Amino acid sequence: MTNIQKEETGWNLDNSYARLPNIFFTKMDPNPVDAPELIILNDSLAMSLGLNANTLKSEEGIAVFAGNGIPEGALPLAQAYAGHQFGNFTMLGDGRAMLIGEQITPSGERFDIQLKGSGRTQYSRGGDGRAGIGPMLREYIISEAMHALGIPTTRSLAVVTTGEAIFRETMLSGAILTRIAKSHLRVGTFQYAAQWGTFEDLQQLADYAIQRHYPEIEADENRYLSFLQAVISRQAALIAKWQLVGFIHGVMNTDNMAICGETIDYGPCAFMDTYDPATVFSSIDIQGRYAYGNQPSIAGWNLARLAETLIPLLHEDESEALKLAQDTISRFPEAYQSSWLSGMRRKLGLFNEEDDDASLINQLLTMMKNHQADFTNTFRALTVNKLTDHKMFGSSEFTEWHGVWQARLERQQESIESSYQLMRDSNPAVIPRNHRVEEALEAAVVQGDYRVMNQLLEALQDPYNYASANEKYTTLPESTIPYQTFCGT
């Protein structure tokens, strides 16, 4: 096992999570691989973390991404957590991931450095702990696209192949993703503490989460209630951002809801083409639990599970604690609706608020559903005032709606030009279209050609750029076969 000196790469690692009670993790040695090769490195992210991108591309740098080398200051471990998976509670944990440490950036920020697909752990539950190159590249593409869209997310630093084959339905090339997160604390981490830990374990976890993510509330009279309120606020804003770009997570289990308010775990996720609240992409979500239209209510359900874990901390009287939890959770729908409505106003160029705005927005969405209009391209067409490419724009109901919308714009103090600029800033021209992602992955995985993926990534870095050069990424798939995604990342 190679030890990497921090002077060579810029590693500046701490291990605050490892100072929690031992119940929350298992220290482990990395699982080395045969012949790692670097597929992609996120140079700009590396730089922001204080890392030397050129050195990371060396044999010593690649060794870290593969689990063959340990940076100075690292303390590799697998985290323990639980979760409701499709409504069923179970013990979980990092079954194929390893936290190597927390990078302290030049600006003083703290980020988890995690290897995903790094091999078996105590929590693997019979799995091999490995991952295929396709799913790892897919997470790289989607997470970086989400970041460029301005949506809080874990990010991807690098993908390496392992030189080893893994077996799923077929033989696949093994790969490891290096994931960057503000932390990997989850609702499921608190569920684990509440189920299997002591009161002191739960309290230490909550204090740690507050110190790491919400230090402004440490001195509050009831900091645990403030903590719950803060998590609810961040999740309301996050889910609203998902809905505003048509993102469908696909597996909103409680272990996939991060306490810090980042999007985490890009398994069977995808972006909606035709607008329909019932849209599901995951092959295993046969009941539609995690459909696009259900995401806000599922987020509320998950947060209620978090509130349950905090009841012992909220008040010494259980009935009073329960009331505090219920009152706080009941505010989530309003917080979400406020974030979503504000975002939809921006998508339609509205600077101020009027009572009928929700009706105006919902009328448009209803038309989009009835006419099977593309979600992203409809708002794109409104933004560039090109209303000729879809049958909906020729309908009498749209003509009537358009007149009401234009009158609404004219009642604002801001100019029409300012409204359209607001729309350009709020409506992405480019998203990771599912068929474009699959096209890039097929070229990379099957043909070993990464040019398609790199071109896609370049376009996704600037999603609000309406340049004609990106037109090809706005087209819809020719196939009418419903798009389906699978767990496995």
Image (cartoon, grey):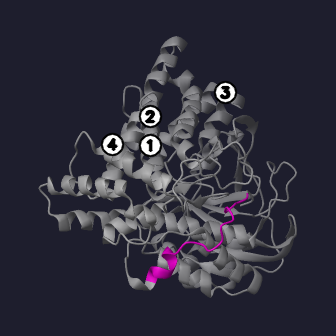
Q: Earlier in the sequence, mark 3 or mark 4?
A: 3
Q: Residue flagged by tag 3: what amino acid is it?
A: Thr
Residue marked by disc 4: 359
Q: Residue flagged by tag 2: what amino acid is it?
A: Phe
- Nearest the eye: 178 or 415: 415
Q: Quadrant of residue 273?
A: bottom right
The secondary element bearing badge 1 is classed as helix
State the quadrant of the N terminus.
bottom right
The secondary element bearing badge 2 is classed as helix
Q: Is residue 138 left or right of residue 107?
A: right
Q: Measure how far apart labels 3 and 1 are at the Cα level.
A: 30 Å
Q: Residue at x 68, y 81 (%)?
A: 38
Q: Residue at x 88, y 69 (%)?
A: 170
Q: Quadrant of residue 346?
A: bottom left
Residue marked by disc 3: 198
Circle number at residue 332:
2
Q: Measure how far apart labels 4 and 1 are at the Cα level.
A: 21 Å
**Magenta-colored stretch includes residue 151:** no
Residue marked by disc 1: 236
Q: Residue 224's spot in the image, x, y percent? A: 47, 30
User: Which residues fall within the magenta stretch?
Assistant: 470-486
Q: Is residue 248 visible?
A: yes
Q: Measure how far apart labels 4 and 2 are at the Cα level.
A: 21 Å
- Nearest the eye: 70 or 301: 301
Farthest front residue in view: 396
